[in-house]
Image (cartoon, grey):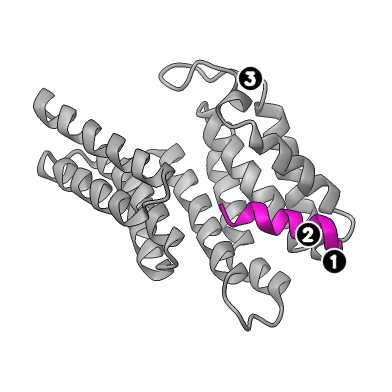
């Protein structure tokens, strides 16, 4: 169990990482999150290790270091499954879908973007949906719906996109039970509603709706 001093050190490093990430300083963010991970490792606190490795992966994929980011998240998913943390496992798999989509959309020379998304990214969101289904951590379900719906719609996977839109809108006004955030889910990230509505507009033609597809692509890169 992490000592009070260890916990304070971890929280400070994690906070520093979030601040650096928000400022766009991804190298500094990565350093802070990796140091936080070393603190968690020293105390054998696997849950906190996941919470350090996940944003570290986000910093890596923001710098285009997709393989390293994927490796970190795959380790997190394995760890979460071993610890029976179904919510952490589900959102980590969802984040793997985001990395795959980011790589596809930002790599020149991908001939069929929609097919690549269907093959590499969309299955991750479908898997995350099944893992998170019915879980009381509503924000993780909302986040998977937010990103998964627009990527699935862009890829032409209408059925999954519609399922995720319905899931996201269903949990958006609800409040999670303890120990999760005791606020209406959509207030944590109001942009999620916009992304799900954009996904709904994409449903008829997917990535072949030029203006809306370009809007959705811009939102996918964040």
**Front residue of this view, candidates 8 and 156:** 8
First-in-chain label (2 vs 1): 1
In the image, residue 31 lies in the stretch drawn in magenta = no
First-in-chain label (1 vs 3): 3
In the image, residue 219 lies in the stretch drawn in magenta = yes
Which residue is at 44% across, 16% downward?
A: 178
Q: Position of residue 33 (x, y in %)?
A: 27, 47
Vertical placement of residue 179 versus 164, above or below: above
Query: Which type of secondary structure does the marked residue at label 2 adopt?
Result: helix
The secondary structure making up most of the magenta span is helix
**Apparent side of residue 139 relative to residue 150 in the rendered image (left or right):** left
| Disc 1 to disc 3, C-alpha distance | 34 Å
Vertical placement of residue 194 versus 123, above or below: above
Q: Position of residue 160 (x, y in %)?
A: 73, 52
Q: Position of residue 77 (x, y in %)?
A: 39, 52
Query: Which type of secondary structure does the marked residue at label 3 adopt?
Result: loop
Which residue is at 29% across, 44% downward?
A: 52
Which residue is at 50% across, 29% downward?
A: 137
> Which of the image's four quarters has the N terminus?
top left
Residues packed near mark 2 inside 10 Å, few (<14), some (14 to 19) or many (20 plus): many
Question: Mark 2 against mark 3, which lies toward the viewer?
Answer: 2
First-in-chain label (2 vs 3): 3
The quadrant holding residue 206 is bottom right
- Would residue 133 be visible to someone looking at this image? no
The disc label shown at residue 174, or none: 3
Question: Mark 1 against mark 3, which lies toward the viewer?
Answer: 1
| Disc 2 to disc 3, C-alpha distance | 29 Å
**Front residue of this view, candidates 82 and 102:** 102
The disc label shown at residue 208, or none: 1
Q: Are marks 2 and 1 in contact (CB under 8 Å)?
A: yes
| Disc 2 to disc 1, C-alpha distance | 7 Å
């Amino acid at each position: 169990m992490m000592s009070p001093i260890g916990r304070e050190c971890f929280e400070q490093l994690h906070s520093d990482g979030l601040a650096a990430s928000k400022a766009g300083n991804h190298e500094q963010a990565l350093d802070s999150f990796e140091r936080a991970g070393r603190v968690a490792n020293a105390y054998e606190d696997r849950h906190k290790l996941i919470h350090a490795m996940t944003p570290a992966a986000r910093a890596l994929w923001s710098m285009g270091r997709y393989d390293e980011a994927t490796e970190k998240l795959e380790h997190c998913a394995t760890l979460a499954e071993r610890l029976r943390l179904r919510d952490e496992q589900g959102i980590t798999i969802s984040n793997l879908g985001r990395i795959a989509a980011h790589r596809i959309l930002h790599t020149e020379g991908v001939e069929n973007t929609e097919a690549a998304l269907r093959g590499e990214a969309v299955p991750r969101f479908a898997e995350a949906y099944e893992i998170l289904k019915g879980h009381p951590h509503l924000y993780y379900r909302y986040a998977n719906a937010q990103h998964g719906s627009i990527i699935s719609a862009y890829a032409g996977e209408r059925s999954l996109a519609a399922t995720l839109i319905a899931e996201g809108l269903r949990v958006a006004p609800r409040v999670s039970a303890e120990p999760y955030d005791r606020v209406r889910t959509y207030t944590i990230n109001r942009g999620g509603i916009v992304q799900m509505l954009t996904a709904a507009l994409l449903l008829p033609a997917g990535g072949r709706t030029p203006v809306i597809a370009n809007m959705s692509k811009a939102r996918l890169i964040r």
